[in-house]
Image (cartoon, grey):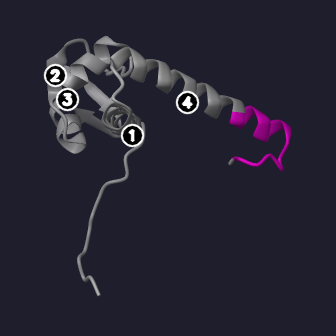
Amino acid sequence: MNDEIFSGLLLNDEHCLSLSELSHACDVHADWIIELVNEGILEPRGKDIQHWQFSGISLSRVQTCVRLKRDLDLNLPGIALTLQLLDEIQSLKNHLRGIDPDFDQS
């Protein structure tokens, strides 16, 4: 039996991460996150890099980007397009769920 205890912090749009915190949490270099911002994949709050703040949702988005790069070897434009399509699918599922409460999400 494993007796390890884990602790964590639940992040949402109210919690913000700095560039260094986000890069550390996702185990990626800060330069890669800057590239994600330049590609329009992430939208930080703050005018300059030193004051950028990322929502908790950004953490999940960067982790998805990491998986797309690692598993599918996508470049940044490919990652951006894939995320856009995944967002559209989720939006359509939400719309269908509103029309048909019995809509199967699988």
Q: Secondary structure at mark 2?
A: helix
Residue 31 in the image, given as x and y percentages of width and height: 16, 22
Q: Closer to the camera: disc 1 or disc 4? A: 4
Q: Secondary structure at mark 4?
A: helix
Find disc 4 in the rendering and name its residue. 86
* Inter-mark Cα distance, 2 to 3: 9 Å
Q: Is residue 96 magenta?
A: yes
Disc number placed over residue 19 in the picture, else none: 3
- The residue wearing badge 1 is 60
Residue 91 versus residue 38 in the image, above or below: below
Question: On the image, which quarter does residue 45 sit in?
Answer: top left
Looking at the image, tell me whether mark 2 or mark 3 is earlier in sequence order: 3
Using residue 89 as the reference point, say whether residue 41 is left or right of it. left
The residue located at (55%, 30%) in the rendering is: 86
Residue 58 placement (x, y as % from top left): 36, 33
Q: Residue at x 68, y 48 (%)?
A: 106
Q: Amino acid at mark 1?
A: Ser
Question: Which segment is the magenta one?
Answer: 93-105
Kindly state the secondary structure of the residue where label 1 is placed: helix
Cα distance between the residues tagged 1 and 2:
18 Å
- Marks 1 and 2, the one that precedes in the sequence: 2
Q: What is the C-alpha distance between the residues marked 1 and 3? A: 14 Å
Image quarter for residue 17?
top left
Residue placed under numbered mark 2 in the picture:
31
Residue 73's disc number: none
Classed neighbour count for the residue bearing mark 2: other residues with Cα under 10 Å, few (<14), some (14–19), many (≥20): few
Picture coordinates of residue 63 (x, y %)? 34, 39
- Mark 4 residue type: Leu
The type of residue carrying mark 2 is Asp
Closest to the observer, 71 or 96: 71
